[in-house]
């Protein structure tokens, strides 16, 4: 009889642990989903000025806060130390919805510094601490100096684009009501230049030179890729206006020239890879202004496009927009 009793205990003990851990997991899921409801209610409040709808939303917020208080006061079974530590679900239990003041502002700085507010449409966004940013627009070259007899490239701006794909993190500076955040991360920047006067880069006597392309069918393209580290201060002045100022530094990892020529009846497509004595390092400043969901971005490279002691002294500048998701 005693042996049977021990067998029952041995079999029941793991089931008890599973039930215990399931209760903790279910509670944390409730906390997480209740927090998500809180976020969506705040978005709904921003989308209407109708007093009747606002009153209904405020009523829903009231019950959401009651649920939050109930969850916070729930007594959970003691967690089993032999199990792997479960990841803590995010909960903004101290967030004030501003029910007395309709013009409340969120304390969540991740939402304060959105370019287009795409996070509103992403479920489980509270689990994602890092944002994915895309910047794109046109770029060109500012020529400071050029050696005598060297060919000057004529960049066709409408066909010369830059793209940047980055992972960024925002950390608020100061107290919870601060509207300043430090943004940092890493990204991949691509500068593409379309040459209107049909020239390409070559290296002659260990010096970079732009040379003419005979029989060019389309504008020759020069693509340069960099791994960069952006760093900026983001300022949130209001829900409809924010700005960012900072800089970036990077290392060149990719250079290719694309040519398409048509000598006679043939059409030849080429891709040429080399360093062309381009500067391996790039660094500069960037500035952006956001107004009601639209961001204008400007960037200027203080570094020379080429290495020192070359015929060309050039700086790249970019103008475009950005999107964070």
Image: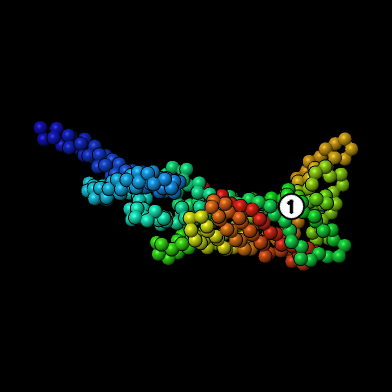
**The N terminus appears in which quarter of the rendering?**
top left
Label total for image: 1
Tell me which residue sits at (51%, 52%) in the image. 114
Q: Secondary structure at mark 1?
A: helix
> As drawn, is 218 to the left or to the right of 134?
right
Residue 11: percent from left, percent from top: 21, 35
Residue 299, quarter of the rendered image: bottom right
**Residue farthest to the right, as pictured:** 264
Residue under circle 1?
157
> As drawn, is 261 to the left or to the right of 9?
right
Residue 265 shows up from this direction: yes
Tell me which residue sits at (27%, 48%) in the image. 66
Residue 184 shows up from this direction: no
Residue 222: percent from left, percent from top: 74, 51
Tell me which residue sits at (13%, 35%) in the image. 5
Tell me which residue sits at (43%, 47%) in the image. 49
> As drawn, is 216 to the left or to the right of 107?
right
Residue 282: percent from left, percent from top: 66, 61
Q: Dot 1, crowdedness within 10 Å: few (<14), some or many (≥20)?
A: some
Residue 108, quarter of the rendered image: bottom left
Q: Which is more toward the observer, 108 or 289?
A: 289
Residue 245: percent from left, percent from top: 57, 63
């Amino acid at each position: 009889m005693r042996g049977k009793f021990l067998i029952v205990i041995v079999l029941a003990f793991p089931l008890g642990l599973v039930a215990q851990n399931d209760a903790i997991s279910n509670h944390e899921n409730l906390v997480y989903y209740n927090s998500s409801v809180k976020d969506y209610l705040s978005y709904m409040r921003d989308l209407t000025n109708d007093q009747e709808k606002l009153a209904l939303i405020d009523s829903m917020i009231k019950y959401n806060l009651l649920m939050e208080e109930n969850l916070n006061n729930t007594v959970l079974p003691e967690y089993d130390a032999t199990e792997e530590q479960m990841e803590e679900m995010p909960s903004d239990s101290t967030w004030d919805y501003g029910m007395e003041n309709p013009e409340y502002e969120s304390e969540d700085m991740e939402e304060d510094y959105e370019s287009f507010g795409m996070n509103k449409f992403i479920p489980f966004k509270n689990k994602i601490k890092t944002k994915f940013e895309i910047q794109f627009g046109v770029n060109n070259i500012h020529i400071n100096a050029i050696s005598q007899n060297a060919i000057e490239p004529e960049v066709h701006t409408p066909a010369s684009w830059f793209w940047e794909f980055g992972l960024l993190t925002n950390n608020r500076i100061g107290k919870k009501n601060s509207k300043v955040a430090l943004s940092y991360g890493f990204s991949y920047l691509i500068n593409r230049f379309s040459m209107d006067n049909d020239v390409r880069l070559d290296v002659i006597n260990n010096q970079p030179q732009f040379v003419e392309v005979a029989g060019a069918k389309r504008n020759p393209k020069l693509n340069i890729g960099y791994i960069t580290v952006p760093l900026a201060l983001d300022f949130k002045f209001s829900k409809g206006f924010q700005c960012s100022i900072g800089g970036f530094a990077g290392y060149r990892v990719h250079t290719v020239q694309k040519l398409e020529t048509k000598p006679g009846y043939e059409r030849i497509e080429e891709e040429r890879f080399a360093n062309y004595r381009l500067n391996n390092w790039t660094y500069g400043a960037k500035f952006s202004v956001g107004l009601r969901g639209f961001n204008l971005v400007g960037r200027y490279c203080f570094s020379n496009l080429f290495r020192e002691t070359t015929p060309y002294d050039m700086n790249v500048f970019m103008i475009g927009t950005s999107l964070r998701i």
